[in-house]
Amino acid sequence: MLISGRCHCGHIRFTLDWKPAPSDIPARACTCTFCVKHGGVWTSCPGGSLKVTVKDFRNVSRYTFGTKTADFHVCAYCGVVPLATSLIDERLYAVVNVNTFENVAPSLLRRTAMTLDEESGNERLDRRRRNWIANVDYVQG
């Protein structure tokens, strides 16, 4: 299943190739203050691939906080955060914000709250290796 998403103005776009096609999509509403304030509801498909296209890298802010192990990609034009990435052992992993999806029926999303405050830094990186999208292509275009 190909899932398209973008920030509000379209400066940051992505296509997620979700394999195999899901019967539902887990949508994790993180309870950290950044995600709560920005409406971040994240999903990933470890067996899928993600292509992110940014019109101009200079107009994407990367916000990092807490354990400083993930970058939230914020569009400098519209302020939307369509994805977060984590560089682990020289490999880029990512999750995408379901609120930026364009072609997915809301009934397909299985929303749950997720609190990760108790994770250690190593536990967090191990979880991302297992669960985040590991095939990420991030280009300007």
Image (cartoon, rainbow, N blue to C red):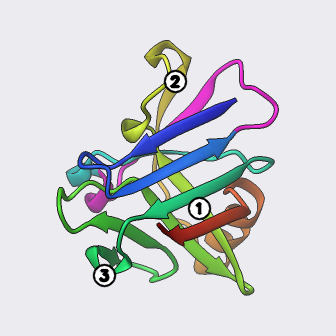
Q: State how far apart marks 2 and 1 are (Cα).
A: 18 Å
Residue that mark 1 sits on: 94
Classify 10 Å Cα crowding around label 1: few (below 14), some (14-19), many (20 and above).
many
Q: Amino acid at mark 2?
A: Leu
Please state, as top left, top right, bottom left or bottom right, where the N terminus lies in the image.
Answer: top right
Instruction: Find numbered disc 3 in the image and state the secondary structure of the residue it sits on.
Output: helix
Instruction: Find numbered disc 1 in the image and state the secondary structure of the residue it sits on.
Output: strand
The structure residue drawn at horizontal position 37% and vertical position 37%, both measured from the top left corner, is 99
The image shows residue 59, relative to residue 96, as above or below, that is below
Residue 25 covered by magenta stretch: yes
Mark found first going from the N terminus, 2 or 1? 1
Q: Check contact, mark 2 vs mark 3: CB within 8 A.
A: no
Mark found first going from the N terminus, 1 or 3? 3
Q: Tell whether 110 sits left or right of 91.
A: left
The structure residue drawn at horizontal position 26% and vertical position 54%, both measured from the top left corner, is 80
Name the residue nearer the viewer: 70 or 58.
Answer: 58
Q: Amino acid at mark 1?
A: Ala
Q: Tell whether 68 sits left or right of 131.
A: left
Residue 1 covered by magenta stretch: no
Q: Tell whether 61 sits left or right of 52.
A: left
The structure residue drawn at horizontal position 44% and vertical position 35%, both measured from the top left corner, is 101
Whether residue 29 is visible, yes or no, is: no
Q: Which residues are magenta?
A: 18-35
Instruction: Find numbered disc 2 in the image and state the secondary structure of the residue it sits on.
Output: strand
Q: Check contact, mark 2 vs mark 1: CB within 8 A.
A: no
Q: State how far apart marks 1 and 3 are (Cα).
A: 20 Å
Q: Amino acid at mark 3?
A: Arg
**Residue extending furthest toward the front:** 141
Name the residue nearer the viewer: 72 or 15.
Answer: 15
Percent from the top left, x then y, of residue 121?
A: 59, 79
Residue that mark 3 sits on: 58
Residue that mark 2 sits on: 109
